[in-house]
Image (cartoon, grey):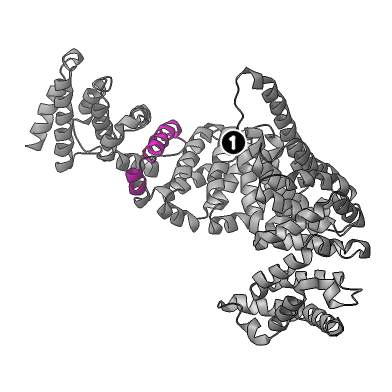
Amino acid sequence: MIDKVALIIIFYFSLPSYTLQGEDNIEQLCLACTKLYQALDEGNMLGKRFKRRNILLKTLYKLVDVDSDPLSLKLAKIILAMKVNGKDLLGVCKLAFKICRNKKNDFIVQNDTLLDYLLAVLWNEDLQTNNEALVYCTAAIRFMSENDALLYKMVSKGAVEMFLELMKQINNIKEHDTYFSKLDHLLVQVTATLHILADCPLARRQLSGSGAISELCVALEQRGSDKDVCIWIVRVLGKLSTYNDFCAALADCSRCYVLFLALLNKYQKQQDLVIRVIFILGNLTAKSDQSRERVFKEKGSVNTLTSLFQTYYELDLNALTWHRDKKGKGKKDQKYPSKAEDVLIKLIRVLANLSIHPRVGAALATAHPLVGLLITVLEYKSVDACEELVINAATTINNLSYYQVENSAVQDEKLHIAEMLVKLLMSYNMDAVVEAVRVFGNLSQHHEIRDFIMQKKIYKFMIALLDSKNREVCFPACGVLLNLTVDENKRAFLMEEGGIGKLVDCLQDFGPADWQLSCLICKTLWNYSEDMTSAASCFGEDTNMLLLLLTAFLDEEVELECSLDRDIKDCQRVYWEREFKPVAEKLLDRIQSHHSSS
């Protein structure tokens, strides 16, 4: 009975193609295909078991040229189910690709089983024999993966494992093999699909323990001469590097560092590739001292990063000049980073991360060309024009200014840097202000900078910042004030500008919640009161409040109440015992000894 049904449908399909046009006929053909598939499936005649298979396939192929995606979908499914190979397989994979790349077909594709047959092709077909067919098959699946419902379906059916296995097979074919270069297009489709799959939590869990990072790095090493392959691999790695477990796995892959730096050298002006590589390096160096050291130790790494910096600084400068020329012709100001700015933002983030490592930071501080470029960013770019770029540059200079090393470029240019920082202090951007103050905190350890701060009246700004009630603002501002009080001839400014009262207010506001800041305040007041003869003349109307606060804060019971969180409480207790208590006790003794006589 089933065989008879199949023959009737085959006969129907044998009608001349000119009789098959029109919506009604298309709908009938779709229905006939559905019945044919059911008949073949129920009769166990799918695959190569059907005696009239060749006749059926020839008839089906006659219908492929009918301009109807719903019909093409049903034809593709039946043809794949018949286990075709060679040119027939290539043809049906091309047909599936044509259907799937049209977003309008999402609904019909989602409600059919074409995906199952395409996945079967990937599982079963030989990589070298059917390379081109696999390219179209994978591309079709890639378009399917953009549909959430199909994405989760393919992941649940083992698509992640399948793509990784395919990548392993590709990686096992070496460069001298005749098939090597022919597999580039397939690898592009595989990695492009993995890039989409990486958004799915279930897919990431499957990728996590599968050695995916290692295989991607192998592919990157073998295919470094193919820009398209490299871009898709770094896109996948970039996305995965935003997750801690993958970032740690990538950090442990020792070869990745030299691979990334090689890509930056080879494709220096390919912004789309460069931006992703430095994004990954930024993620790797964000939390790991091991990664910071590994990047720095790679041969020529500093030269590579400096050259990249120079290239994109020049591109941005040229773009800025062009932009100014065009301003009078109706061109609006950009409120978002340009492509060159985006590279610089992420590149400087890498430099900021690297400079956190003590040995690496100390070495980078002596890299004069690199420091020169950071300073140049502050010279030619305003916070309003590109906030993130300027703040990243200031942050990096701040990190490097921490290192008091011989031949430090930061120390050599400290006055020049200070002049640039004044612009940031005058901006309305509080993040920029804080970064500028932090740099002044490090640079003000040098008497030339302390003189500069007094001459330019910057100390008034630092005192005013104490009113912010924000720890991130008050701490660096107080650090600058502490350094200024090192010089005897500069201490009077604290009383003149109301600084004493503001410091005491800060001590009252933060107190036990922040023993580090409280310690900094006490050290500043200690320096200020070195030649004190009378507590009242030294601290004025703030004397009694200062005595009250110091007495209260030196009480261990107050110290123990500083935090409910045990870890924070333990940490704060160490600060209280080692930093705050010694200087607070000395300051209290000094004030008390001069208070009774005042």
Q: Quadrant of the C terminus?
A: bottom right
Residue in view at x 71 percent, y 55 percent:
292
Residue at image position (85%, 57%) is 444
Residue 581 at x, y percent in the picture: 75, 81
Quarter placement of the N terminus? top left
Seen in the picture, residue 531 relative to 5 is either above or below; the reply is: below
SS assignment at label 1: loop
Task: Please identify the dominant SS of the magenta region.
Answer: helix
Q: x, y percentage for residue 476?
A: 74, 60
In reply to whether residue 146 is colored magenta, the answer given is: yes
Q: Who is closer to the viewer here, 516 or 365?
A: 516
Residue 497 visible here: yes
Q: Is residue 385 above or below residue 296?
A: above
Residue drawn 69% across and 24% down?
324
Residue 194 falls left or right of residue 405: left
- 341 to 24, vertically: above or below: below
User: In this orientation, does residue 402 appear?
Assistant: no
**Residue type for callout 1:** Tyr
Q: Is residue 35 left or right of residue 283?
A: left
Q: Where does label 1 land, which residue?
A: 336
Q: Position of residue 13 (x, y in %)?
A: 16, 23
Instruction: Answer left or right for 194 relative to 298.
Output: left
> Callout 1 environment at 10 Å: few (<14), some (14 to 19), or many (20+)?
few
Picture coordinates of residue 367 (x, y %)? 84, 47
Q: Is residue 385 above or below residue 285?
A: above
Query: What segment is highlighted magenta in the picture?
Result: 128-153
Residue drawn at x 15%, y 30% is 31
